Amino acid sequence: MEGVVSRPLRIVYLCTSAQGGMLHYAQSLSDGAARHAQTTMVVLGERQALAGLPDAQSIRAIAWSTNAVRRKILELYNPLFYRRLARTICARFRPDVVHITAPVHGLAALVGALRARGVRVVYTVHDPRPHEERLTLWGRVFGGYQRAWQIPQALARCAAVHVHSSAHAAALMARYGGALAASTYVVPHGGGLTRRIAGGRMQAPELPAPDECPTMLFFGRIEPYKGLEDLLACMVELKRRGIRARLIIAGAGSIAASSLNALSGSVTVINRFIDDTEIRGIFEASDLLVLPYRSATQSGVIPMAYAFGKPVVATRVGALAEMVVDGTTGALVGPNDPEALAGTLERLLRDSDRLKQMGEAARLYVAEHLAWEDLARGHLAVYQAVCKATTDLRHAVLISR
């Protein structure tokens, strides 16, 4: 593909997860760009998860093998599978640009095969620094291989590399080298609700009956870096101070039962994967979202909370401080400090009018600053630039708050 593309660009958004936040991200970005380009969303996932995809014309599913041994040996970790995937995408959709929006085990092979067919590849790096997660021995070994060889090789071959903040761009350069500066661009994480989340009417059976008690929400997969232990310690402190409040913990992951012993009756645990159709009910049962993260890059849960009109209390880590307008859409506190978190929450929980004002400000903020269609224009400017063989994207687009 040479020169300027005069017709509408053909963009494929490739997501390697058929559920959860990565799927929401890719679907929202694809929908946001659809008014200005010919977009197709390709989802690679297990058949069972693919069967639950929303019925949308723009989504195309590619399934892994149902046999676990075959999937791991011949597909998941096999470069030849990703080269075949590239051929399939090119043959079916004839894209000008493939934007890979989620981590890929065979990233280098996929990018190389797409590039060999004249396709411009854009890759979103969600986490320039790896999170502290519970990993198997194989997970740690493969993660080390990814960071040491495969990701640098793939990023060097991409036409453009996307991050969500200037801080993420700096972290990416520090980790993989300043040579990426010319191909890296910044567009923030968008906000809003997918059609399935917005229309969800299922009530999680674990939710407590409504009452007048203010309710906080911890939402998302539970990992050590997310600081749930700090939030539970904060709940104990609030209880000691005589603050009547409830906490909903919604997400898969490990929770130490001993951490809940002192909070009987105050905490509702929905310890499983949350279906899209249940998300609305969980947020509507809450008054604010609390993210006590000990480390982070960004969070897709924050703009989701904003779209539901819920303020956010978060720690000053990663780009969370760029997403929460302190005193307007929520509040910011230092990490690893349950007592300070308790003080901030106490002030907010005692002032229901302030919470409602912050919620309305949050809803307005996501509409004015994080609308997916507006942010998609920034990505489209980059797609146009790389299709014109522009080699330096530093002045192509930089959208920030």
Image (cartoon, grey):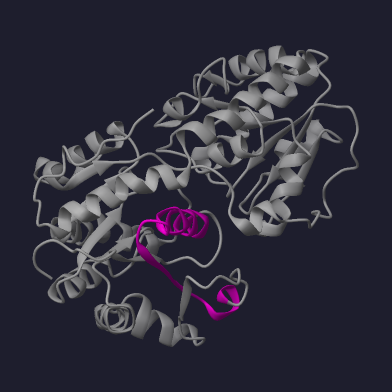
Outermost residue, front direction? Answer: 6
**Percent position of residue 198, x then y:** 67, 52
Question: How many discs mark residues in the rendered view?
Answer: 0
Q: Quadrant of the N terminus?
A: bottom left
Residue 293 visible? The answer is no
Using the image, determine if residue 256 lies above or below residue 40: above
Residue 340 rendering spot, x and y as whole percentages: 59, 14
Horizontal arrangement in the rendering, residue 161 relative to residue 363 (left or right): left
24 part of magenta stretch: yes
Task: Judge left or right: residue 97 versus residue 359.
Answer: left
Horizontal side of residue 91 vs 297, given as left or right:
left
Nearest to the observer: residue 141 or residue 115:
115
**Nearest the eye: 149 or 290:** 290
Q: Position of residue 299 (x, y in %)?
A: 48, 40
* Residue 220 visible, this angle: yes
- In the picture, the quarter occupied by the C terminus is top left
Q: Position of residue 10 (x, y in %)?
A: 30, 68
Magenta residues?
22-50
Residue at x-position 52% and y-position 17%:
326
Q: Is residue 282 left or right of residue 360?
A: right
Find out whether residue 371 is within the magenta segment. no
> Residue sitting at 77 percent across and 18 percent down?
352
